Image: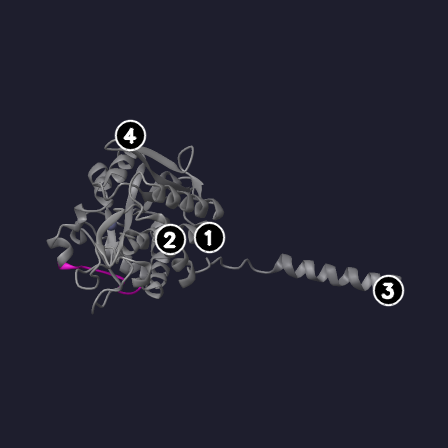
Amino acid sequence: MTKNIFIILISVLFINCKQTTIAQPQEKTAEKTKVSDVAAIINFLASDELEGRDTGSEGLEKAAKFIEEEFKKNKIAPYFETYRDTFDAKGTATYNVVGFLKGTDDKLSKEFIILGAHYDHIGKGKEVDGDVIANGANDNAAGSSAVIALAKQFAQLKNNKRSILFVLFGAEERGLLGSAHLAEVLKEKNINLYAMVNFEMIGVPLNDKPYKAYITGYEISNMAQKMNEYAGSELIGYLPKAKEFQLFRRSDNYPFYEQFKVPCQTISTFDFTNYNYYHHVDDEASEMNFEFMAELINSCAPVITKMANTSDKEVKLN
Ligand SMILES: [Zn+2]
């Protein structure tokens, strides 16, 4: 190398370095959840290999391991000593899988948002054409995929001032046992819970509604209004049937509401007309609308980000 070329090279390097130093920091954006990400999660959780993810089954164990791997891969920490929050489901040991992303703000990180979905299902169902496995794709591999995908987005960004727990509940189908257990444990620890957003049966779009999903317990808080304000669109609506069938009390949000008396509600798109396979062996991955799901998850991400970052707790009970 001649001296001149060496000097030119050094100059080029120097200029490049200088440019890098003075460049404005880019606004970080998370990679959006892809249709193929949602499909991969649901295709596994709702596969025949997992045999309907019944409490105490080997299939449920496989589902839990899969979720733990997803958390690990995406650098979501365990909230307890391990990801598993073990409890007794009427004589059967089972577990919630609990991931944790600490908030970035000294003060607000002491406040928590819980994003949840149950990952268990009922195992076997009434036989149809030789099929007995109730795969639980919509109920609730769908909601589980939302929590896993959101965990990945939040872990990439790390721009949540409040702390977030990502929880996949066990034994929901046995009577909300996993959520009842965790709500009690967290109440004993006296955590400062801001709100809980649960995802149930979001695999198929609503029929003829201006909004993408509805929320249970619509009237108990301003959560729907705030979510729409944060979204800048009509994302969340009111479904009269949800009230008629008291869905607010029928999923994992309810034990948290009972313990903490703060906004704890479920987002769903099951409207009693758009899906015929509730607790049915045909509740299969092939019935899911992955495009819709990815769209819904990607619409929820900025809304939850806003919830995690406002200086005051803007979502309140009415
Ligand atoms: Zn369910």
Q: How is the image coloured?
A: one colour
Residue contact at pointers 4 and 3, CB within 8 angstroms: no
For image coordinates 30% across by 45% down, the residue present is: 120
Query: Which residue is identified by label 1?
Result: 157
Residue contact at pointers 2 and 3, CB within 8 angstroms: no
Instruction: Examine the rendered structure and indicate whether residue 68 appears above or below residue 89.
Output: below
Image coordinates for residue 50, horizontal then vertical, percent: 35, 48
Gap in angstroms between the C-alphas marked 1 and 2? 10 Å
Q: Main secondary structure of the magenta part?
A: loop
The answer to whether residue 318 of the structure is visible from this angle is no
User: Is 61 one of the magenta-colored residues?
Assistant: no
Q: Disc 3 or disc 1, which is closer to the eye?
A: 1
Boundaries of the magenta span? 232-240
Query: Which residue is identified by label 2?
Result: 305
First along the sequence among labels 4 and 3: 3
Image coordinates for residue 180, horizontal then vertical, percent: 24, 37
User: Is 238 one of the magenta-colored residues?
Assistant: yes
The answer to whether residue 224 of the structure is visible from this angle is yes
Instruction: Examine the rendered structure and indicate whether residue 231 appears above or below residue 196.
Output: below
Q: Disc 4 or disc 3, which is closer to the eye?
A: 4
Residue contact at pointers 1 and 4, CB within 8 angstroms: no
Image coordinates for residue 10, horizontal then vertical, percent: 78, 59
Say which amino acid is labelled 3.
Answer: Asn
Residue contact at pointers 1 and 2, CB within 8 angstroms: yes
Query: Which residue is identified by label 3?
Result: 4
Whether disc 2's CB lies below 8 Å from ligand 1 is answered no
Gap in angstroms between the C-alphas marked 2 and 3? 53 Å
First along the sequence among labels 1 and 2: 1
Is residue 162 toward the left or the right of residue 255 in the image? right
Gap in angstroms between the C-alphas marked 1 and 4? 31 Å
Query: Which residue is identified by label 4?
Result: 188
Gap in angstroms between the C-alphas marked 4 and 3? 72 Å
